[in-house]
Image: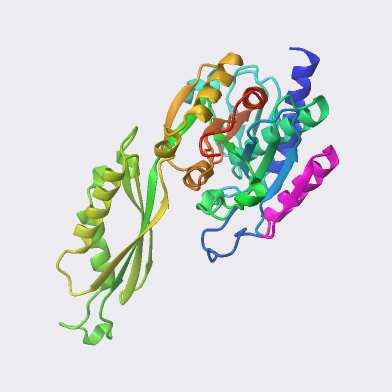
Amino acid sequence: MGDEGRGMIEELGRRLMAYCAIDTPSDPDTPEERVPSTDCQWDLLRLLRGELEEMGARDVTLTDDGYLVATIPGTQKAPVLALCAHVDTSAQFNATEVKPRLHAQWNGQPLQLGEFVLDPADSPYLASRRGHDLVTASGNSLLGADDKAGVAVAMTVARKLLTEGNPGGDVRVCFSPDEEIGRGAVVLPLDVLKADVAYTLDACEVGELCYETFSADKAVVTITGVSIHPGFATGKLVNALHTAADILNALPRELTPEGTSGREGFLHATNLTGSAHQCTLTFILRAFELDELEAHRQRLREACAQPTKCQVEVAFTPQYRNMRDTLEQDMRPVDLAVEAYRRCGIEPRFIAFRGGTDGSILTARGLPTPNLFCGMQNFHGPLEWVSLQDMEQSALVCMELVRLWGKQAPLSGK
């Protein structure tokens, strides 16, 4: 490996470890109008703003809602390309006091991370990364490579373009909050971003390319019973919790996340709160096709319509839609990503992503945004890891995309 390649890997490692050490978990329990949902996300956003200003990026803007956008000027009149990543981390596992560890030129042996063991015997992909420089956390927290690996890749690409020259059109880098709780791209100001096409850096293994995601709804079931002193409740008490249990038992167990895979959608009960008098069940509904999503809604309606003395109300809220339906109208963002992968010696693998990305929402808002790999593995847990060499491959793909988009005419509708 030449000095230039090693230099990029070292830069990616420095950035990743510095960014991961800053706590940035988002909080789904804050009011939806509060963006970012946690004050700690500002710490990383302000650091990134300072780094972008220092490296010479133009129009560096940090909005009142925590969206950071900057411009790397190009040399070609071409569609404006945006590279996007999110700064928040999941609160699914402990995401505070993260202590990143670098395992340089990993020897292929199991890694002891606190009480946990990262064992290549459990993962052929990990085993194939012997000799790579791996970054993990300490075992007491997640790492946060979702999506700070993407942040580090975008920042490294920005620095290289500013230092060595941008052979394409203007490039925007965009860092957003609250992706992990589904709010990140909802109010991202597109009039500030001013991009024609975007890519999120939020997928996993080298070669993954995602232009298809779940379509998603949230459902809230409110159950109201009749409250009375339990000592005098005979024939009078109506327990809302019993009805909640009946609703859960009426739903097909095989359509839960743990019972589905591939292109199968699911109904997932995520929360039960309340009391015997009134309680609330929260669900997420996921499917790749809209008719399947409607079938999930109907199953939940039927479960809620069982005979009961409780009052049962169910409300559905759309969350995001499969980006494929929009991207198929102009496949250039996907086709050029395929070409960029292959020019970097990477064979693309299309992933029907069993989740959503900021790109799902941005695409629906009119900004086509496929999702590219950035190397993160085992995210949202203590065994999270990422290879710096995988991140380097992501950065090289981004550089190639800048060159390819620099030769393109405007997108349809632009």
Rendering colour mode = rainbow
**Residue 82 visible in the snapshot:** yes
Residue 95 spot, x, y in % from top left: 61, 49
Question: Seen in the image, is 121 located left or right of residue 233?
Answer: right
Residue 159 on image: x %, y %: 78, 32
Q: Looking at the rendering, which quadrant does residue 281 occupy? A: bottom left
Horizontal side of 225 relative to 188 (left or right) equals left
Is residue 144 visible from the viewing direction of this image?
A: no
Q: Which quarter of the rendering shows the C terminus?
A: top right
Magenta-highlighted residues: 39-64
Which quadrant would residue 232 be assigned to in this image? bottom left
Picture quadrant where residue 274 is located? bottom left
Q: Is residue 78 above or below residue 97?
A: above
Q: Position of residue 84 (x, y in %)?
A: 62, 40
- Location of the N terminus by quadrant is top right
Task: Tell me the residue at 49%/47% (across/down).
Answer: 361
Residue 236 vertical position relative to residue 342 in the rendered view, above or below: below
**Nearer to the camera, 285 or 104:** 285
